[in-house]
Amino acid sequence: FMPIAEPWKGDGDLAGPLFLCYGVALLSIAIVVTSDWVLAAGMALLWIALIQLLDVKITAREWLASARLLPERPVLVVLAGSRPSEVGALMQPFGARGEKLVERAGPVSVVLPTVDSVKPMIIERAKSWPVAPVLVSGEEDKFAAFRAADVALAASGTVTLELAVAGTPMVVAYLVDGVAKLLRPLVKVQSIVLANLVLGRNVFPEFIQERA
């Protein structure tokens, strides 16, 4: 059985496959033992993420040049969600966290992958950010940005698996509405981050509700 060797770190070409192999092994065993088809769906998502990542031919340096980003400047990828409710809740606090990062670490390049359904909303809300983000669309540009990023700030969801497969360090946050907040005591899992569930321990920090 593959040991846990911090598969999200190290060489970018190796980190993703290591994470995938570990996740597939873990989920396969869980499925055999528990017949849990939710985990089977998780395994499928891992495979999809790796296939998409391996399909990206451009290198991180080439992508930075194509996006006109300075190669010596740290890159922060921000993923505020793919639904209007997520974008509405997270764009403001994510922008504030980006501002604090600039205050502490100096200039950074901010990349903001988006999808068509929420792109106008993201463009409007990003106007208040102190650092103007570079917006990217499409799976290839998204995964290329993941490879080029030094760190990601992400909404909880399947994107955390994609970031882990890409070998991108991340911090995860999430806000829910009042009705969903009432159901919080019913959540029994150790983490809301799918990548943490695959690894079996809370490797990637998560901040929920008032801590986001």
Image: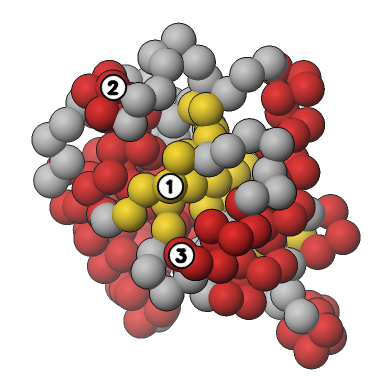
Position of residue 173 in the picture relative to residue 208 (left or right):
left
Is there any visible trace of residue 111 in the rendered image?
yes
The answer to whether 49 appears left or right of 202 in the picture is left
Residue in front for this viewpoint, 79 or 49: 79
Q: Is residue 99 left or right of residue 51?
A: right
User: Against 115, is 207 above or below?
Assistant: above
CB-based contact (under 8 Å), mark 1 and mark 3: yes
Q: Position of residue 169 (x, y in %)?
A: 51, 34
Please tell me how crowded label 2 is: few (under 14), some (14-19), or many (20+) other residues with Cα within 10 Å: few
Q: Is residue 176 above or below residue 167?
A: below
- Crowd rating for badge 3 (residues with CA inside 10 Å; few <14, some 14–19, many 20+): some
**Residue at image location 43% in from the left, 47% down from the top:** 135
Q: Nearer the viewer, residue 32 or 126?
A: 126
The mark found on residue 135 in the picture is 1
Tag 3 near tag 2, CB within 8 Å: no
Distance, label 1 to label 3, CA atoms, is: 9 Å
Instruction: Identify the residue position indicated by label 3 in the image.
Output: 119
Looking at the image, what colour scheme do you see? secondary structure
Residue nearest the observer in this picture, 136 or 140: 136
Residue located beneath label 2 in the image: 65
The type of residue carrying mark 3 is Lys
Mark 3 or mark 2: name the one nearer the start of the chain: 2
Q: Position of residue 41 (x, y in %)?
A: 33, 74
